[in-house]
Amino acid sequence: MVGGISLNKRASIKFFGDVYGTGYRFFIKQKAIELGLKGYCRLNAAEQIEVEVEGAEKALNEFLLFVQKGVSPQADSNSFSLELYDDLKGYVRMESDIV
């Protein structure tokens, strides 16, 4: 908190490589919800898992540690790209293209 205002950030992550049948979207959605992050997780046209989450900087940092350690034990690789932003998009929930 700075001057009584919570610092919020947004992250855009793309996972590529071994993304089918690994549970990535399930684990990502569950962890984001657990940390109070909002955004989405889906398989994009390039067959990458595309994630965008935003929320408190502390929660986002914890989420990024989770990503770096390896989201799914079933995946053979943990390849991803990451971009961080200060601007928010105003997501109201964590959504996924799976249940």
Image: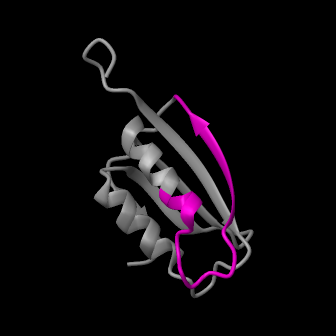
99 left or right of 22 in image: left
Q: Which quadrant of the view contains residue 83?
A: top right
Q: Which quadrant of the view contains residue 30?
A: bottom left
- What is the x, y in percent for residue 59? 37, 45
Total number of numbered discs in the rendering: 0
Instruction: Look at 55% across and 63% down and name the residue there.
Output: 69
Q: Between residues 36 and 65, which one lies in front from this camera angle?
A: 65
- What is the x, y in percent for residue 26? 43, 75
Q: Is residue 79 magenta?
A: yes
Quarter holding the N terminus? top left
- In this rendering, the answer to whether 2 lies above or below 64 is above
Quarter holding the C terminus? bottom left
Instruction: Look at 66% across and 69% down and name the residue there.
Output: 78
- In this rendering, the answer to whether 68 lies above or below 37 is below
The reply to whether residue 56 is visible in this rendering is no
Q: Which residues are magenta?
A: 66-86
68 left or right of 47 in image: left
Instruction: Look at 53% across and 80% down and name the residue there.
Output: 73
78 left or right of 6 in image: right
Q: Is residue 47 magenta?
A: no
- In this rendering, the answer to whether 56 lies above or below 63 is above
